[in-house]
Image (cartoon, grey):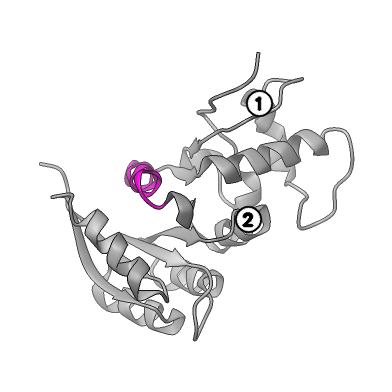
Amino acid sequence: MKKTLRILLADDHQMFRDALRSLLEKSPHIEIVGETGDGLEVVKLTQGTTPDIVCMDIGMPGMNGIEATRRLSTLCPETKVIALSAFAEQRYAMDMFDAGATAYVTKSGAGEELLRAIEAVQNGQKYMCPRIASLIAGTWSAQRDIKLSPPLQLSARCCSWLPKVIPRNRSPTSCSLRIPPSKCTAATSCASSTCTAWPN
């Protein structure tokens, strides 16, 4: 029997939380154990309800999602964080992964994309939505030729095995990252085992 996933929703927009709840409760294998729009409350609720996954907004009052994720990675290491953000920007994704998030999905794709992220996290993988994956892959491609400065610089670990994923002399138009935990321990050490839509 498939395990029921216990999920906590953290976003400061009630309507967005309601939409997420409606989406996720359609699955018989998902239980919403709580919700909040405050970053400090996220930490308290997670400690009290021990969810499997927290869907975490980045911009919240009380404490932002990056810091809340960082605290949860220490206080509740068994709980995985899926970042939900309105920002399709590499620096936010890198900050969230560095804080301990397991997946990053933009709010514009918080439908089927979120369900794919949940599935990946449940299978012990990291996940990035195609837009963010493409940006990070593009940064790596540029870093092969020029020295970039933080926050755009990717780690040496990342650059060491990205060539196995991204063919030389090709540029990604979109890619989706599903990364085994053994391959990635922080935002800047991420790459993909599944990339799609590469031009010929």
Q: Residue furthest bottom?
A: 62
**Disc 2 designates what residue?**
94
The reply to whether residue 88 is visible in this rendering is yes
User: Which residue, as the protein is rendered here, is positioned at the far right?
Assistant: 146
Q: Secondary structure at mark 2?
A: helix
Residue 118: x, y in percent?
A: 34, 48
**Hey, which quadrant is residue 12 in on the image?**
bottom left
Q: Which residues are magenta?
A: 110-124
94 and 22: which one is in front? 22
Could you tell me how far apart the alpha carbons at marks 2 and 1 are, in whole angstroms?
19 Å
* Predominant SS along the magenta part: helix
Q: Position of residue 107 (x, y in %)?
A: 46, 57
User: Do the residues under discs 2 and 1 have CB atoms within 8 angstroms?
Assistant: no
Q: What residue lies at 89% left-to-right and 39% top-to-bottom?
A: 146
**35 sits to left or right of 189:** left
Query: Is 117 included in the stretch rendered in magenta?
Result: yes
Q: Looking at the picture, which amino acid does disc 2 mark?
A: Met
Quadrant of the image containing the N terminus: top left
142 lies above or below 20 = above
Neighbour class for label 1 at 10 Å: few (<14), some, many (≥20)?
many
Residue 35 point in image, percent of width and height: 30, 74
Q: Looking at the rendered structure, which numbered label has been put on residue 114?
A: none
Residue at the (58%, 43%) spot, across then down: 131
Q: Is residue 96 above or below residue 121?
A: below
Q: Nearer the viewer, residue 114 or 75?
A: 114
Instruction: Please rate how many residues cluster around mark 2, counting C-alpha atoms within 10 Å: few if below 14, some from 14 to 19, many from 20.
Output: many
Q: Looking at the image, which residue is at 54% across and 39% down?
A: 130
Which residue in the structure is indicated by mark 1?
A: 166
- Mark closer to the chain start, 2 or 1: 2
Q: Amino acid at mark 1?
A: Ile
